[in-house]
Image (cartoon, helix red, strand yellow):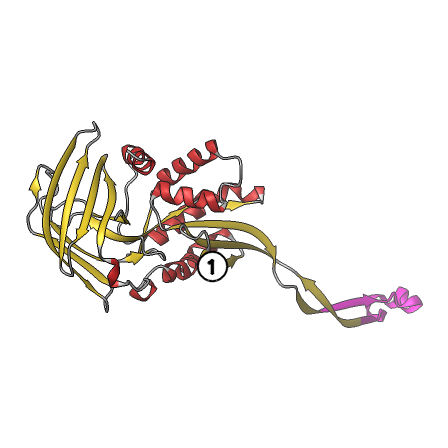
Amino acid sequence: MNFRKILFAALAVAGMSLASAQTAAILDFDTEDAQYADRMPILSDTFRAEMSNSASLTVVDRKNTNAALAEIARSQTSDYMSSDNVKTLGKMLNVDYIIVGHVKEIADDPETVTKEYTTVTQSSGGLAGMIFGDSAKKTTTTKETRDVVTQNKLIQIVVQMIDVETSGTIASSHKEIRKWSEFNSVVKGLAKPLLDACSGVGKIKRVNESMFSGVWECELFQNGITDIYTLEFIDDTTVKVEIESIDRRGKSTKSKGQGRWRYNAQEKVFVLTVNRLTGNVAHITRLSWKSMIDPAKNEKSFKMSVPVSSAQNAKQVRGEFYRTE
């Protein structure tokens, strides 16, 4: 078994599941201000929950993300968000994006306010004041204006979405708040540019239909089971499929069949149907796939959503197919 199979199989045993649609791992926010450190888990979870509400993005569980980060930290001495480590983390979690957040205190723009001051003074009244009392004293009122400069402190939250394949930032967003209680009112706006960047058919690269030829392989991992799919495109409509399924104990079962495929260029949707598979892979007896295709720039791999079984309404996971021939 090659390194890629070993790595993904290990993660499957650990219970790391793949996600449908596009996927992201959100790291806990960081800050250089020690006074804010205890706030980071709360902000991170609130933002993670907001991102998880979108149908266009599936967010990896925080526990799995932290476990992968710990693994990288044990084996790396360099910056854990370096280009190489972003790609490593992305592969370990099988995600499209890594999202990071940073919190810091900044000074608001100076504001000049003109204030009016009133000064009241009262003279003693001299000898008359001594004789006639307060009625002989004189009161003087003086008014003056002064410019007062004020500068409040703001809390700035910056988030970035990093593409695992290129290690480049594809979207970012920031919000400023005056107090922590305001975060809930800005979190939706903070998340929106990131969700906009990874949603919609128009964001998916156009597929060169000549790419659907030769042999492609994909490994999917779910609940400790490794399913290895091999697709062989015979012609413009016919495809052969072979499946090898390996359970936690290493027992292997196989099935195969032949079906039909088509690609709708306008909707950017790939459809594959195999009405009957022969063999002994119990949870996969037929295939009915329909998914948008996200091809790599070199067209040597593509990502799509695949059902984990033949059951109706089966969960879908994000898989990547690699050209082998």
Residue 36 is situated, as x and y percent measured from the top left of the image, at: 54, 44
Q: Secondary structure at mark 1?
A: strand
Residue at image location 18% in from the left, 45% down from the top: 308
Residue at image location 53% in from the left, 50% down from the top: 103
- Between residue 267 and residue 152, name the one nearer to us: 267
Up-down relation of residue 100 to residue 176 (above or below)? above
Magenta run includes residue 121: yes
In the figure, is residue 135 to the left or right of 256? right
- Between residue 162 and residue 167, name the one nearer to us: 167
Residue segment shown in magenta = 116-140
Three-letter residue code for mark 1: Ser
Outermost residue, front side: 325
Q: Residue 246: name its quadrant.
A: top left
Up-down relation of residue 78 to residue 20 (above or below)? above
Residue at image location 84% in from the left, 65% down from the top: 133
Up-down relation of residue 12 to residue 178 (above or below)? above
Crowdedness near tag 1: few (<14), some (14–19) or many (≥20) residues, C-alpha within 10 Å: some
In the figure, is residue 73 to the left or right of 144? left
Outermost residue, top side: 249
Quarter of the image with the N terminus in it: top left
- Between residue 63 and residue 281, name the one nearer to us: 281
In the figure, is residue 72 to the left or right of 139? left
In the figure, is residue 174 to the left or right of 251? right
- Between residue 299 and residue 288, name the one nearer to us: 299
Outermost residue, right side: 127
Residue 227 is situated, as x and y percent measured from the top left of the image, at: 20, 40
| Residue for badge 1 | 173
Residue 69 is situated, as x and y percent measured from the top left of the image, at: 43, 38
Up-down relation of residue 201 to residue 8 (above or below)? below
